[in-house]
Structures are given as structure tokens and as C-alpha cells.
Image: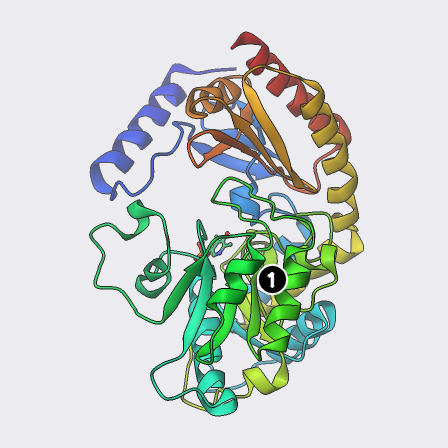
Amino acid sequence: MLHVDEQSAAASLIALEEEHGAHNYHPLDVVLREGRGAWVTDVDGKRYLDGLSAYSALNQGHAHPRIIEALVTQAARMTLTSRAFRNDQLGLFYRKLTELTNLDVALPMNSGAEAVETAVKAARKWGYLVKGIPDGEAEVICCTNNFHGRTTTVVSFSTEPQYRGGFGPFTPGFRIVPYGDIAALEAAIGPRTCAFLVEPIQGEAGIIVPPEGYLREAAALCRANDVLVMADEIQTGLGRTGRFLAVDHEDVKPDVLILGKALSGGVYPVSAVVGRRDVMSVFRPGDHGSTFGGNPLACAVAMAALDVLVDERLAERSAALGALAMARLRALESPRVVEVRGKGLMIGIELDRPARPFIESLAARGLLCKDAHETVIRFAPPLVIEDTDLLWGLEQFAAVLAAA
Ligand SMILES: *Cc1c(COP(=O)(O)O)cnc(C)c1O
């Protein structure tokens, strides 16, 4: 039921954002107020299926009761100690995270970009201390169309003009190779290369899946040349692609794994770098830190978020539902659709024209999606989505594409 005063509430809230906020985003004009599972409700009471999951931060769905319970309980007990003191959650979080990722040592941060920065610092210092690269000359190899966040150093190795324009001067020490091209990686590796930073599937670039075997071959090449493999699984990790980690599809064990987003189930900013002991032990007291990194609230929330992924078998769910969704979308055979690609519930529908009008039509029908790289509709609902809700969502794609 719509009320006139609530409709004007949406308009006035949008006006407030426009007037007093920096315009670094161009959101759809839906003003959301509540979320449960795969569904969200706006200030007018209209319900939408969430087809974005906050860029895969909400793999466990909105307001998962176990995660909220952990949040509320820990918030009432203690939120922050700083790392000047120890807290009773951090060790437990380390144990859970390292066991689940089969790696040795973790370093907690808050945002994804901070974790990427942390990984770059670890790789450089490892390069100097362990590999013996001359001081100040370490190189990290990155891929074209990468997305690793928005800090000044991270945009220094972006190939997207808009992410860099006006923000220089940039941090040196990065080399770019075409994504998916093993020969180019091999040619780029030299004696000063400390690490290869890679997304197993490129999300922001438009759900780009590299050729089969790419990650496995890249990892073997890096190993042979004493180069660290650093997998940015901030978006692909934690069940999104149908395995716990996307590198699991090719049985690759990275030396350094970068996690964020769903590490907290979308409840609180938690990121982490998890890696081999000999790499992570280059950090000495005072080398690196974060006031909020590893705080007990973050740890309690992240442990609950990880438990939910495991106990509800969300990676398996992502694989099964993703296969169903991909098959249905491919069967649409719309002349507007160039390609449907992805893994698990990380799906890109590439159109022959800009995606934004389709996104707006989907929103009008109650499905919230986001365009990626202009012509791609990204479909990545929470992994807890009910089968019937997924089928309903797929019907909305069919209807919008049929109308085009
Ligand atoms: C979202 C994302 C980041 C950045 O995370 P923030 O929390 O926004 O800083 C880095 N890498 C990848 C692959 C991402 O998807």
C-alpha cells in the first residue's frame, strides 16, 4: 500500500543525498529501508529481489539471524580494544580463517582496498627480505581491466581511465599484462618480480572468466620463478562462484589470499590477508596496522559469517542454483544477448547495447541488478536465495529482454 507522504519521503531523501553528498556514485533511485534474506524493501513499501548482494558482500543474505545475533551480543560486550591489547575473539577468528582457507597466517583489515594494500606491502617486503630484490625495485604484475579498490596506490595499477583520471601522481612498481594470457605473464616476469596479483574471475570488468587452466598455469609459472601468487578473492571468494574459493576450481593454492565483502556477511567492514607463514612473517611489530583491524566486533561477526557459509553449504547452493540460472538465461536466445557467462551465482549477461535501461526496467519489475562495464548486466543474488525466488528473478530477465 503506497502512501503519499512516504512517496515524498523517498523524493526528499534522494534530494538530501544529491544536495549534501559527493556525487561519486550514480545509484538507481530506490531508497531501501529493510532487508531480509534475498529481499529488500524501499521506503514506499515496495519489495525487490536483490540481484547484486552489495557486490557479493551479502552472500549470506540480508540480516542473517546468526550473524546479527553475533553482532548484537559482541557489540553489547566489547567493540574495540585496538591492537595495543589482545582481545578474546581475534585468536579464534585467526584459527577459523586459516583452517577454512588452508593457509597459515592471517592479518585483518577493514575494507577490501586496505587488504589489497596490505598484500602489496607484504609482497614487496618479502621480495626484498626473502627473494633478494634490490631495495626499491620490486615489481608486482597485475592484469588489464583489474579491479582491486580505490586507494591511490591501488588505482595506480588500474587500466580504467576513469579510476585514474585526475588522481595522479601514481605509485610506481606495477606492470600490467593482458588478463588470461599466460605467454604475456611469462614474458613479464623478471628477477625483480615479487608477485602476481589476480582476480580468479574479474567482477567489475564485466564478469570475465579467464580461459580454463589459466590460474593453474599462472600459479605453476609463478612457482617456477619464485613469484608470489596473490589471489584477490574479495568478490569471487566465500562461495560466490560455487566453490569456497574461486581458485578451488583449478586446485590452485595461492601464497597470499585477499578476502573482504562476504567475510562479514555484509554486516560490518571486515577484510583480511591470509597467507603462507614465510610471507606473512615479514611483518614485524610496528610495520603495519589499523586501529579497527581485528577488533572483537569484526572478529565475532566474521566468525558467524564463515559459520553460515559452511553450515548452510552456500558454495554448493551457489553451484547448483548458478547452473540452473545460467541454463535458463542461455535458453532465452534473445537477440539482445551477446553472451551469458560466469560461475556459480556470479553471472554476467552481456548485451549488444548499454545495460542501464534494462537495469531500470528490471528494477520497475522488482529485481535490483547492476550494470558492469556499460553493456553487462551482473546477476549475483544472495546465495541463500530460495529456488522459487530465483526462478521468479529469471522470469523478470525473460520479460525485460522480450520487451526489448
Ligand atoms: C570490492 C572489491 C575490492 C575493494 O573492496 P572495498 O571494500 O570496496 O575497498 C577489491 N577487489 C575486488 C576484486 C573487489 O571486488
Instruction: Please give the residue where the numbered disc 1 appears in the rendered image.
Output: 301
Whole-percent x, y for residue 23 in the image: 26, 40
Amino acid under label 1? Val
**Image point 40% across, 22% down: which residue?**
6
Q: Nearer the viewer, residue 278 or 132?
A: 132
Q: Quadrant of residue 285?
A: bottom left
Mark 1 nearby-residue class (10 Å; few <14, some 14–19, many ≥20) = many
> Along the horizontal axis of the image, is 189 left or right of 135?
right
Residue 223 sits above or below residue 234 on the image: below
Can residue 401 be seen here? yes
Residue 280 sits above or below residue 35 on the image: below
**Image point 40% across, 89% down: which residue?**
286
> Along the horizontal axis of the image, is 348 left or right of 213?
left
Q: Nearer the viewer, residue 251 or 297?
A: 251
**Image point 38% across, 88% down: which residue?**
134
Element at badge 1? Answer: helix
